[in-house]
Image: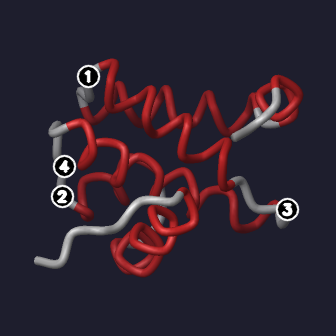
Amino acid sequence: MYRARDQVENEEWLAAIDDAAERLDLDGDAKSRAIDLFLSTVPTEERSKRATVAASLYAGALIAGDRRSQSDVADAVGVSRLTVQKRWKGLLEEFGLEPPQW
């Protein structure tokens, strides 16, 4: 879980989630799950945060049943599709969820 202070310290990245969720036309549940995933697994290294935003959005949308392609999420956040592909499963595992095995 995360603390309220985590939200304050990561306002810039939460705004990036908001912006990308709007571009992807994600529903509120998917965005909320992405925010929870991000804040619960936020990396300490600043350079890793954009990748975590992308992975959180992809996984949050997947969990909420409002699925988007890795390419669409990557484009909305400004990372490569490979970044999303490499990170989303580990993010779910770190959050305590088991990724699908398709």
Q: Which amino acid does label 1 sit on?
A: Asp
| Left or right side of 10 for 32 | left
Question: Between disc 2 and disc 3, whose residue precedes?
Answer: 3
Question: Between disc 4 and disc 3, whose residue precedes?
Answer: 3
Q: Name the residue under label 1.
A: 27
Query: Crowding near pointer 4: few (<14 within 10 Å), some, many (20+)?
Result: some
Q: Is label 2 or label 3 in front?
A: 3
Rendering coords of residue 42 (x, y %): 71, 53
Q: Nearer the viewer, residue 21 or 27?
A: 27
Q: Mark 2 points at which residue?
A: 69
Q: What residue type is labelled 4?
A: Arg
Rendering coords of residue 102 (x, y %): 11, 77
Rendering coords of residue 73 (x, y %): 32, 53
- Above-or-below relation of 24 to 41: above
Disc 1 and disc 3 in contact, CB within 8 angstroms? no
Query: Crowding near pointer 2: few (<14 within 10 Å), some, many (20+)?
Result: some
Distance Cα–Cα, label 2 vs label 1: 15 Å
Query: In the structure shown, which secondary structural element does the residue marked by tag 1 occupy?
Result: loop
Which residue: 35% across, 67% down?
98
- For the N terminus, give its image quadrant: top right
Query: Crowding near pointer 1: few (<14 within 10 Å), some, many (20+)?
Result: some
Which residue: 27% across, 45% down?
63
Distance Cα–Cα, label 4 vs label 1: 11 Å
Query: In the structure shown, which secondary structural element does the residue marked by tag 3 occupy?
Result: loop
Q: Mark 4 points at which residue?
A: 68
Disc 2 and disc 4 in contact, CB within 8 angstroms? yes
Q: What residue type is labelled 3?
A: Thr
Distance Cα–Cα, label 4 vs label 3: 27 Å
Pick out the residue farthest to the top: 28
Tag shown at residue 44:
3
